[in-house]
Image: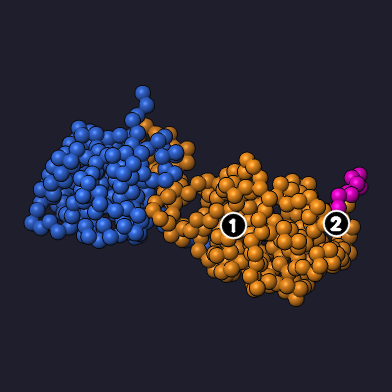
Chain colours: A orange, B blue
């Protein structure tokens, strides 16, 4: 359910945003348009412990909404609607990444389009030690002919646009190395489906098959994968048929909302609060 | 010249409407059942009394006073306490029998004037309007409220308009033209 207030007229008043959204949780509250508030004094991340059966999402409210977090071995697809700002997606993925890194676990990231490895490191660095980033974080990046890529957190993709097998072998090696470096801890993988689809557009069947392998491996190893699916991707629907966890971020009139399809959850308004010392996702139920 | 504003009492709304409703305005709050009209209007009155020491009258024609007070308590609004302090009166017009619409209207105006109310809510105009035989009576009623309460007494007034499911448009087709502000509340579903 979504609630909307439309201001049809108000004498002597300039209305910039005539359509607003609201909730009746604890009274009548207009929901804020999405904006990012950065903490003035960033604090080191304080890990939220996992349960025996679930990984914490890095956000206690989200853990509660999802019934304890993400089950170990889950492959989660976060489907993102048109117009959802990238910062809203980061609000979802950043705590998860920080919670893994700060517990000496490995994190492997295939960035979504338009995001570079340095963007990701800039996002993470204020909240965890650089030594942890160097040891436990790997970001897949395509080899560029003119740029040397020596940063310890970069894992180069050498397969080329049509050689998925070679890239897949490199990813598997990264996972093995991260496991070794962290003493056999579970690994978080964050994947941008738009990067998959644009890179391997000529071999869609091989890509579906590789996603199937990844889902099986993730479950077998007790890892966690978060796949971010932007709108209009062909692979999303087929991948959705293979997974047990499907979440959505949508945008309406400048507001961002979150809900789960698998597991089914209520609709929640998403806002950003910097008071904890990092960008914290605040969830307000729509009732 | 800038209009004097009355804070709406709704979190996040005043920032969008230049600080609140224009003082001494007639505001329609319309919507289907269950869209939050009662909470919106009750919060306007409650926060006005608690935060700004503005007296108010809440007229309930759609539900019993006891039920209204109980319901609002769930949202942290204690109208019983406010009535004891004399800041607010909740008028239960549901139980008034054998009174004509103009009698009811006179009672409301008298109560509001005697309390020096700066905020008035009538829940709902639609219920009152059902008693009218002719459209002209509704027009007379609206002009009475606007003339005696809104303009002379500077009492910012919310009229609640019920929109039945499946009906387009607001009500009698008069109130939209008389009102200074119209707020339409909706409830929809997300495609899953």
Report the residue at 55% width, 50% height from top.
A271
Residue A269: give x, y in percent of width and height: 52, 54
In contact (CB < 8 Å): disc 1 and disc 2: no
Q: In this picture, which residue range is highlighted in magenta? A: A144-152
Q: CA distance from mark 1 to mark 2?
A: 29 Å
Name the secondary structure under disc 2: strand
| Image position of A222 with respect to B61: above or below | below
Same chain for labels 1 and 2? Say yes or no.
yes
B56 relative to A277 in the view: left or right: left
Give yes or no for residue B136 being in the magenta stretch.
no
Residue A277: give x, y in percent of width and height: 62, 47
Q: Quadrant of residue A210?
A: bottom right
In what quadrant of the picture does the C terminus of chain A appear? bottom left
Question: Which residue is at the far bottom?
Answer: A220
Depth order, front residue of B79/A213: B79
Report the residue at 22% width, 49% height from top.
B83
Q: Quadrant of residue B145?
A: top left
- Residue B39 in view: yes
Report the residue at 51% width, 60% height from top.
A267
Name the secondary structure under disc 1: strand
Give yes or no for residue A150 being in the magenta stretch.
yes
The residue that label 1 is drawn on is A249
- The label on residue A102 is none
A145 relative to B74 in the view: left or right: right
Depth order, front residue of B153/B115: B115
Chain to which mark 1 belongs: A
- The label on residue A155 is 2
Chain to which mark 2 belongs: A
Residue A131: give x, y in percent of width and height: 81, 52
- Residue A115 in view: no
């Amino acid at each position: 359910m979504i609630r909307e207030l439309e201001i049809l007229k108000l004498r002597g008043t300039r209305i910039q945003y005539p359509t607003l959204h609201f909730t009746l949780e604890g009274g009548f509250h207009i929901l804020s348009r999405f904006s990012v508030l950065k903490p003035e004094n960033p604090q080191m991340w304080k890990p939220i412990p996992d349960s025996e059966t679930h990984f914490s999402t890095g956000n206690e409210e989200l853990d509660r909404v999802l019934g304890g977090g993400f089950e170990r071995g889950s492959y989660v697809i976060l489907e993102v609607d048109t117009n959802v700002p990238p910062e809203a997606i980061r609000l979802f993925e950043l705590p998860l990444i920080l919670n893994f890194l700060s517990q000496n676990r490995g994190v492997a990231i295939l960035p979504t389009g338009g995001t570079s490895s340095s963007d990701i490191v800039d996002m993470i660095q204020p909240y965890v030690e650089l030594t942890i980033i160097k040891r436990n974080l790997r970001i897949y990046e395509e080899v560029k002919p003119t740029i040397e890529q020596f940063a310890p957190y970069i894992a180069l993709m050498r397969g080329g646009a049509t050689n998925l097998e070679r890239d897949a072998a490199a990813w598997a090696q990264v996972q093995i190395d991260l496991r070794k470096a962290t003493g056999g801890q579970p690994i978080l993988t964050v994947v941008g489906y738009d990067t998959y689809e644009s890179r391997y557009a000529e071999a869609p069947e091989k890509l579906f098959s590789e996603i199937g392998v990844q889902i099986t491996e993730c479950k077998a190893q007790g890892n966690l994968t978060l796949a971010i699916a932007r709108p209009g991707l062909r692979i999303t629907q087929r991948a959705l048929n293979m997974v047990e966890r499907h979440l959505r971020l949508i945008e309406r009139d400048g507001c961002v909302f979150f809900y789960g399809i698998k597991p089914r959850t209520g609709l929640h308004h998403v806002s950003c609060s910097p008071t904890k010392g990092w960008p914290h996702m605040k969830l307000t139920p729509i009732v | 010249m800038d209009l004097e504003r009355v804070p709406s009492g709704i979190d996040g709304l005043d920032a969008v409407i230049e600080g609140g409703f224009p003082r001494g305005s007639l505001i329609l709050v319309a919507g289907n059942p269950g869209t939050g009209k009662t909470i919106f209007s009750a919060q306007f009155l409650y926060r006005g009394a608690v935060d700004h020491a503005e007296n108010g009258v809440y007229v309930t024609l759609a539900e019993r006073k006891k039920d209204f007070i109980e319901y609002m308590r769930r949202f942290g609004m204690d109208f019983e306490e406010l009535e004891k302090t004399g800041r607010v009166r909740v008028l239960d017009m549901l139980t008034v029998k054998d009174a004509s619409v103009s009698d009811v209207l006179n009672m409301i105006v008298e109560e509001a004037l005697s309390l020096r109310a700066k905020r008035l809510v009538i829940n709902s105009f639609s219920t009152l309007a059902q008693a009218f035989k002719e459209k002209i009576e509704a027009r007379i009623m609206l002009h009475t409220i606007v003339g005696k309460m809104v303009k002379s007494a500077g009492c910012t007034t919310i009229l609640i308009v019920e929109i039945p499911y499946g009906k387009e448009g607001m009500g009698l087709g008069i109130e939209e033209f008389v009102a200074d502000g119209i707020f339409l509340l909706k409830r929809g579903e997300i495609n899953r």
